[in-house]
Image (cartoon, rainbow, N blue to C red):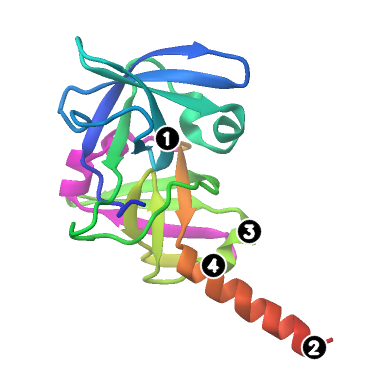
Amino acid sequence: MYTGIVLGTEQVCSMTEQQGYRTIWLSNQHGFMDDVFIGASVAVDGTCLTVTQIQPSPSQIAFDISDQTLSLTSLKDLNIGDQVNIERSFKMGMENGGHNLYGHIEGTVQVIALSYLGETLHLELAVPTEKMKYLFHKGFIGLHGCSLTINQIDPTRSSIAVDLIPETLRLTNFKTLQLGAKLNYEIDQHTRVLVDTLEAIHQRQNK
């Protein structure tokens, strides 16, 4: 499990295509993954990935990404040199400063507008229509692994808006976002359970 508090970014060093999956090697320049082990879980742009290889010098960490995961996420569009957001899995006793995330990505949302309000970045995102029922004003959403608050909802456009403070921009790859970019998103699972349960009850009552 993760909290949506990204530690920082690391760089894609190399990639190789395999049968049914892709292996990516990430730098460990900032030491976020100094104590990882084979089988450990790390969120990469919000996607829960498993450490499959460790290279001590230079320090690089490998992850295998299945074709299914590639098809759902923005990881399929990564290029060598790209920066990705990194979060280590939650440990008991740690502070949870965000909200519970699992790294199970729904798909991607697209940046349809971005503007700076002072040093804060305002993002408008197009969301698949069928997923809008899980998103609420002042609710949570995971975007590229970051726990963010939804500040606007527009059901007619099937869109939401979030605002990124300077510290979030400093630590993440959001600082290089461009119009049309696609971001991995994760719905708050507690909200999903509530909405789906209420829908199921309503359907049974109306039979």
Instruction: Name the image quarter holding residue 107.
Output: top right
Do the CB atoms of the residues marked 3 and 4 lie less than 8 Å apart? Answer: no
Of residue 108 and residue 120, the one placed in the foreground of this image is 108
Residue 60 lies left or right of residue 15; in this view the side is left
Instruction: Give neighbour class at mark 3: few <14, some 14-19, many 20+ (Cα, 10 Å).
Output: few
Instruction: Give neighbour class at mark 4: few <14, some 14-19, many 20+ (Cα, 10 Å).
Output: some
Query: Which residue lies under the disc numbered 2?
Result: 206
Q: Amino acid at mark 2?
A: Asn
Kindly report which numbered mark, 1 or 2, lies closer to the viewer in this rendering. Answer: 1
* Mark 4 or mark 1: whose residue is earlier in sequence: 1
**Local SS, label 2:** loop
Q: Give the magenta part as a residue range.
A: 155-179
Of residue 28 and residue 148, the one placed in the foreground of this image is 28
**Local SS, label 4:** helix
Q: Amino acid at mark 4?
A: Arg
Q: Does the magenta portion include 143?
A: no
Instruction: Name the image quarter holding residue 204.
Output: bottom right
* Mark 2 or mark 4: whose residue is earlier in sequence: 4
> Distance from label 3 to label 4 (Cα)?
15 Å
Q: Amino acid at mark 3?
A: Thr
Q: Which numbered disc covers residue 129?
A: 3
Q: Which numbered disc covers residue 49?
A: 1
Residue occupying image coordinates x 24% and y 52%: 91
* Mark 2 or mark 3: whose residue is earlier in sequence: 3
Query: Which residue lies under the disc numbered 4?
Result: 192
> Distance from label 4 to label 1 (Cα)?
23 Å
Kindly report which numbered mark, 3 or 1, lies closer to the viewer in this rendering. Answer: 1
Q: Amino acid at mark 1?
A: Leu
Kindly report which numbered mark, 2 or 3, lies closer to the viewer in this rendering. Answer: 2
